[in-house]
Image (spheres, coloured by chain):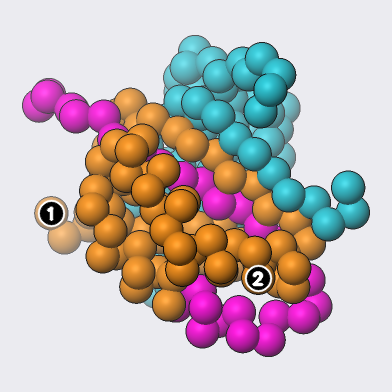
Chain colours: A orange, B cyan
Amino acid sequence: MNTEFTPYYAVIFTSIQTENIEGYAEMAKQMEDLAKNQAGFISIDSARNAVGITVSYWESLEAIKHWKQHTDHLIAQQKGIKDWYAYYNVKICKVEREYSFNERS
Amino acid sequence: MNTEFTPYYAVIFTSIQTENIEGYAEMAKQMEDLAKNQAGFISIDSARNAVGITVSYWESLEAIKHWKQHTDHLIAQQKGIKDWYAYYNVKICKVEREYSFNERS
């Protein structure tokens, strides 16, 4: 926390699935792999129980915008709305500071 | 997205547990209930698979600071470092915009 911190961006995607999740896991994997290859991508974390939370981190708002509009991603979004999601929420956030604990360090 | 948006804050807590999670679930529930009673608390979402993600939302940075320093929460944090977490990362973020989809609306 004493070093200079360069702000970056987080996309918090929170979702509740429908009962029809056929094809979902494959598409989720495909989109994660694709996201990782986009310019400005930093990292991604995902977990799902009653609610699913995926947080992806990006260097800039432009990178997020490009990813949102990526053709294959648009197709996945439409499929998600049509079949897989009962609800979702997307939050665009600026990461202002952070700290970590690691038992091995 | 056409209405005025009041920024608020997200705390993204990402963690990997140790193998010793005795007492963890009870403490997690207790901390979630306690957080919900703090001034400035908005909401919280949690999910865990290989990685655990808990995102809590707050009205201000001051509210986050107070919650971080809450006596019972400090005890939980120490216990977490000592026993339950192999790794964690905390990111303080400003939510700049958001949008939702709801199949029922």
Q: Name the side, left or right, on which A81 lies relative to A29.
A: right
Magenta stretch encompasses residue A18: yes
What segment carries the magenta color?
Answer: A1-29
Q: The disc numbered 1 marks a residue on which chain?
A: A
Q: Please give the label number shown on residue A105.
A: 1
Q: Residues within 10 Å of mark 2 (few under 14, many from 20)?
A: some
Of residues B79 and B36, the one drawn nearer to the viewer in this rendering: B36
Q: Nearer the viewer, mark 1 or mark 2?
A: 2
Indicate the position of residue A42 as horizontal and vertical percent values.
25, 52
- Residue underneath mark 2: A79
In which image quadrant can residue A3 be found? top left
Q: Real-space Cα distance between discs 1 and 2?
A: 43 Å
Residue B75 among those drawn in magenta: no
Say what secondary structure mark 1 lies in. Answer: loop
Q: Residue at x 63, y 18 (%)?
A: B5
Earlier in the chain: of badge 1 and badge 2, it is 2
**Can residue A89 be seen?**
yes
Q: Is residue B104 above or below residue B38?
A: below
Tag 1 and tag 2 share a subunit: yes
Mark carried by residue B86: none
